[in-house]
Image: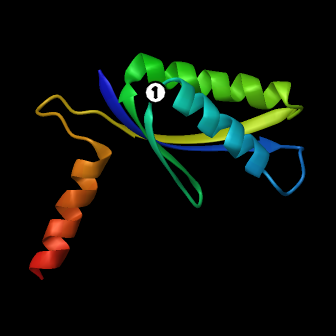
């Protein structure tokens, strides 16, 4: 099953800067060949359900291995069965409507 996820992983107990943890997760997503786009407060990811979930689990394990004693994660996800849709398709749909106005 194809899934599009908005992921926000927040290590707790590591200080105020989390960029090195975000970078570690970005490397993992790249390793799993997942389409992903980082934004200011998270990352959009798309791909096969099992591959995405495996990568998220690996992000958690890696961040713990980097010394974070706790992690809180927020996930918003969507699937659909009526037709294939990518992250870019969703963006293009909105941009088309904006350009029509």
**Label 1: few (<14), some (14–19) or many (≥20) C-alpha neighbours in 10 Å:** some
Percent from the top left, x then y, of residue 1? 29, 20
The one of 61 and 35 positioned closer to us in this rendering: 35
Residue assigned mark 1: 33
Percent from the top left, x then y, of residue 72? 70, 40
Q: Is 26 left or right of 12, judged from the image as shown?
A: left
| Residue at image coords 73%, 22% | 61
| Residue at image coords 12%, 82% | 101
Percent from the top left, x then y, of residue 38? 53, 51
| Residue at image coords 11%, 32% | 82
Residue 11 appears in which quarter of the rendering? top right
- How is colour applied across the structure in the image? rainbow
Vertical side of 72 occupied by 61: above or below: above
Q: Is 59 left or right of 69, judged from the image as shown?
A: left
Residue that lies at the very extreme toward the bottom in this rendered image: 101
Q: Is 46 left or right of 19, judged from the image as shown?
A: left
The number of numbered badges drawn on the structure is 1
| Residue at image coords 22%, 64% | 94
Vertical side of 82 occupied by 101: above or below: below
Q: Is 50 left or right of 23, judged from the image as shown?
A: left
For the residue labelled by badge 1, is the local secondary structure a helix, a strand or a loop? loop
The one of 35 and 72 positioned closer to us in this rendering: 35
Percent from the top left, x then y, of residue 70? 82, 34
Vertical side of 97 occupied by 10: above or below: above
């Amino acid at each position: 099953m194809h899934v599009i996820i908005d992921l926000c992983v927040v290590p707790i107990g590591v200080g105020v800067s989390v960029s090195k943890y975000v970078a570690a997760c970005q490397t993992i997503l790249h390793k799993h060949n997942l389409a992903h786009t980082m934004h200011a407060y998270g990352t959009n990811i798309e791909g096969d359900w099992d591959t995405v979930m495996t990568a998220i689990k690996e992000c958690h394990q890696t961040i713990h291995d980097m010394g974070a004693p706790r992690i809180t994660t927020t996930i918003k996800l969507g699937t659909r069965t009526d037709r294939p849709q990518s992250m870019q398709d969703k963006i293009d749909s909105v941009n088309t409507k904006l350009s029509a106005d």
